[in-house]
Image (cartoon, grey):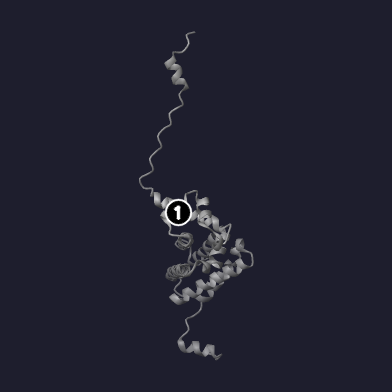
Amino acid sequence: MQPPSPRRALRRRDPPRRKPAAPAPADVDPKAEQQARLIEGMATALTEKGYADISVADIVQHARVSKRTFYENFADKEACYLATYAALSDDVLARIAAAGESDRPAEERLVAATRAYLTALEERPALTRTYLTEIQAAGPEALKLRRSIHARFADLLQHLVERSRKERPLLRAISPLMAAAIVGGINELVLLTIEEGRAQQLQEIGPTVVELLAAVLLAPPISGRRQVNLLRGRRTG
């Protein structure tokens, strides 16, 4: 048996050549991908600490990026916090909208939208608790963002009710202020449940939320004079 030639033996000892890395898809935005990782990093940090105790180092550690990358995307911790709040809220509202746009009967759509909202909050109880109880610690911009998100929620609720009224004309139309009041009431129920240590049992308040919606949507409109009389305790005809 002939020994291998030196050249052939050398080739055998050479490490295998690595294939060149595949180019990133043209539709992938590197900056958007970095921001998504940082948002997820902030979300993870919030499950471990309160907002006031989180540092940029905590965020980049969970995101597995450098501090330089962080500051290329966000001015500071607050900006990342707000972006995380906005992203999570977008997801929750999208779920509500999807449930409300199904082909189910009107009543079932409203119940499904309620369930979708509570399910989304239940999936990340620590984040839900943080954004409902610690939002003031993030400053006035965070409160402004929360009001904006609540307004979008109220607009979505109005849209769902108007669609339902096309099938159920006897349902009451709701004004923007009434929609805002309903959203505020629902969020207060969520907050009370969380403060009781039941952030993972939010579905339990679903029947109360549906009862609230039914009480408003099935109630006849009340004129200004009747409102005054009712507040005074007078009977109205």
Residue 119 location (% of width, % of height): 55, 60
Q: What is the residue that sits farthest to the left in this orientation? A: 26
Which residue lies under the disc numbered 1? Answer: 70
Q: At 57% from the left edge and 66% from the top edge, which residue is drawn? A: 206
* Number of dots carrying numbers: 1
Q: Is residue 65 above or below residue 13?
A: below
Q: At 45% from the left edge and 24% from the top edge, which residue is drawn? A: 14
Quadrant of residue 124 within the rendered picture: bottom right
Q: In this view, does 12 lie above or below 154?
A: above
Q: At 62% from the left edge and 68% from the top edge, which residue is drawn? A: 195
Q: Nearer the viewer, residue 224 or 123?
A: 123
Q: Is residue 38 above or below residue 139?
A: above
Q: Nearer the viewer, residue 8 or 207?
A: 8
Residue 154 location (% of width, % of height): 46, 70
Residue 90 location (% of width, % of height): 45, 61
Q: Residue type at mark 1?
A: Phe
- Would you call the spot at circle 1 few (<14 residues within 10 Å), some (14-19), or many (20 or more)? many
Q: What is the residue that sits farthest to the top in this orientation? A: 1
Q: Is residue 212 visible?
A: yes
Residue 80 location (% of width, % of height): 46, 59
Q: Can residue 171 be seen in this view?
A: no
Disc 1 element: helix
